[in-house]
Amino acid sequence: MSGTSAVANDGDERTNGHDGDRKLAAGEGATGSADDADDTETHQRGVDRSPATFSASLSLLAGLFSVLGSGLGVLTAAAPGFAGLLVLAAGLYRGSRRAVTGGGVVLLGGVVFAGVGGGPPAGLLLGALGALLAWDYGENAITMGEQLGRAADTRRAELFHAAASLGVGVVGSGVVYGIYLGASGGQPVTALVFLLLAVVLLAGVLSE
């Protein structure tokens, strides 16, 4: 009987030992899964969602052209243009669509101010096109950063978007300027009307 009891006890100890090993392994597996999930979440949080650098640079360059266009013939119009450029730069730094849009609006305000002051139509159209492209490129920079991350290689897609927007803008500005030359008689107020028409048309096309 003593031998039988010893065998039974030994069997129980082995069974309990195996159960403990299985529980320990299960616990380690659960801990490992949790650690993997934490690592994945940390990696996802570590993705830089800032605006894409290339499009952001193009946006600032277009904004500078807008300021130059506004300042042609009406130097004081460059002041609101520079203010719009600063707002645009702040929006690109922070990744704020509202600030980027606000910067574009202020840039257009500088163009309108130049138009009221009798600025040359060519400069007004250059300023309007620059302002719209600055807004469009800025929006694209934010979108690229949000969707793919700043570290992703998006240069080709950004370049294609920039070229397409520039092509549409140049063609639209050329058409509007041609209409102005043929029908306006060179009056500043009429030039401003055509400028605003160009702004509406270009904004509608670029927003598609």
Image (cartoon, helix red, strand yellow):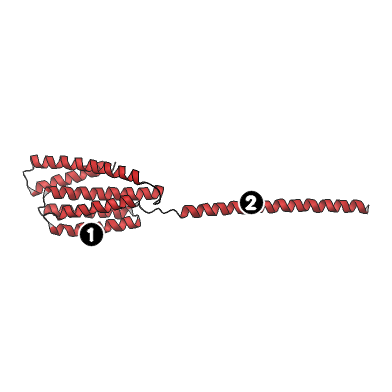
Q: Which residue is mark 1?
A: 83
Say which amino acid is labelled 1.
Ala
Asked whether residue 206 is in view, the answer is no
Q: Earlier in the sequence, mark 2 or mark 1?
A: 2
> Position of 19 compared to 78: left or right?
right
Residue 167, quarter of the rendered image: top left
Instruction: Name the residue located 57 percent from the left edge and 54 percent from the top edge.
Output: 35
Residue 36 visible in the current orientation = yes
Q: How many marks?
A: 2
Q: Quadrant of the C terminus?
A: top left
Q: What is the x, y in percent for residue 99? A: 30, 55
Q: Position of residue 200 (x, y in %)?
A: 21, 44
Q: CA distance from mark 2 to mark 1?
A: 58 Å
Q: Position of residue 76 (x, y in %)?
A: 14, 59
**Which quadrant of the view contains residue 84?**
bottom left
Residue found 65% across the figure and 53% down from its top: 28
The label number, if any, that marks residue 29 in the structure image:
2
Q: Position of residue 85 (x, y in %)?
A: 24, 57
Give me the disc on residue 137: none
